[in-house]
Image (cartoon, rainbow, N blue to C red):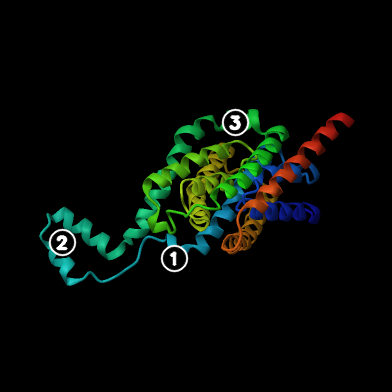
Amino acid sequence: MDILELLKVIVLGIVEGITEWLPISSTGHMILVDEFIKLNVSPEFKEFFLVVIQLGAILAVVVLYWNKLWPFYIRKIPQRTRRAIAKKPRWAQILLTFIERFCDKDKWILWFKILVACIPTIVIALPFNDIIEEKFNNYVVVAITLIVYGVLFIFIENYNKKRVPSTNSLEELSFKTALLIGIFQVLSVIPGTSRSGSTIIGGILVGTSRTVAAEFTFFLAIPVMFGASLLKLVKFGLAFTSAELIILIVGMVVSFVVSILAIKFLVGYIKKHDFKAFGWYRIILGALVLIYFVGKTLLA
């Protein structure tokens, strides 16, 4: 693989790492980037690469939020708790001893909330994923959704200005709220919507603070993006050439590093600002996408 192809992969990794977490649509940006940067690979591998490169972004969330997500530890069981467990049936003693000694119950509850939020996507979106990719993965749909959600960001922030969030921490996040956020995530199957954008909007509308909405969005991405990558891997198989393997590794590494920076930026940004700037950015980008591709069509 030559240097030029390697530079293309690095650019794609940078774009993925930034746009996956900021609510500005990774798909919209990838369509634009793909117009100017063509990887010298088969269409099948390219489709696979653009999904699997997200694994680097997932790893960034795992590394940054390890202490909030890892649900196991080792601790001594208090004597009082031991006496209470000893009164239970033998099978219950084994289970409760394992839970008390090795499991962080609050983090397990968080993971159950994440899984609940994934249910709408699994039930509603997953069966129609191939149809949606075939029918809606074009610049017209992407441009329209970029603009529509940009307007929604501005409108919702104006509406939200005088509201006081009812959920200010992940511990306060109820299973019902998690499910509602998961329903909003279903909207992200339409290209150009932005998975992080739809879930953050959903979180704000159902009463979470911006920080909680953003963090839960990060965590919700882990099973969703890992599942999408696994499906593509099953569909594509493991028959990679050495050049394709290098492309995958470089893309994921770059995406991982840039994702760490993007996540840290977003978390710091939302502590002092709202999401209106992202709304205006989406509107401008959507307009540029329309202008560019309509002009290209007319000049063809």
What is the quadrant of residue 104 in the picture?
bottom left
Q: Which of marks 2 and 1 is nearer the N terminus?
A: 1
Q: Is residue 246 left or right of residue 57?
A: right
| Residue 287 on image: x %, y % | 76, 40
Look at the numbered disc 2 and give the secondary structure of its residue.
helix
Towards the viewer: 130 or 46: 130
Q: In this view, does 183 lie to the left or right of 249?
A: left
| Residue 76 on image: x %, y % | 25, 71
Q: In which quarter of the image is the C terminus?
A: top right
Q: Which mark is residue 67?
A: 1
Q: Which mark is residue 132?
A: 3
Look at the numbered disc 3 and give the secondary structure of its residue.
helix
Q: Residue at the spot x=59%, y=63% of the render?
A: 272
C-alpha separation, residue under disc 3 versus residue under disc 2: 52 Å
The amino acid type found where label 2 is placed reads Ile
How many marks do you count on the picture? 3
Q: Which of marks 1 and 3 is nearer the N terminus?
A: 1
| Residue 81 on image: x %, y % | 18, 66
Q: Which mark is residue 85?
A: 2
Q: Residue at the spot x=64%, y=51% of the render?
A: 276
The answer, for residue 300, to whether it is visible in the render is no
Q: Residue at the spot x=51%, y=58% of the render?
A: 211
On screen, residue 126 above or below 201: above
Q: Which of marks 3 and 2 is nearer the N terminus?
A: 2
What is the quadrant of residue 252 in the picture?
bottom right
Badge 1: few (under 14), some or many (20 or more) residues near its Cα, within 10 Å? few
The amino acid type found where label 3 is placed reads Ile
Towards the viewer: 201 or 10: 201
The amino acid type found where label 1 is placed reads Asn
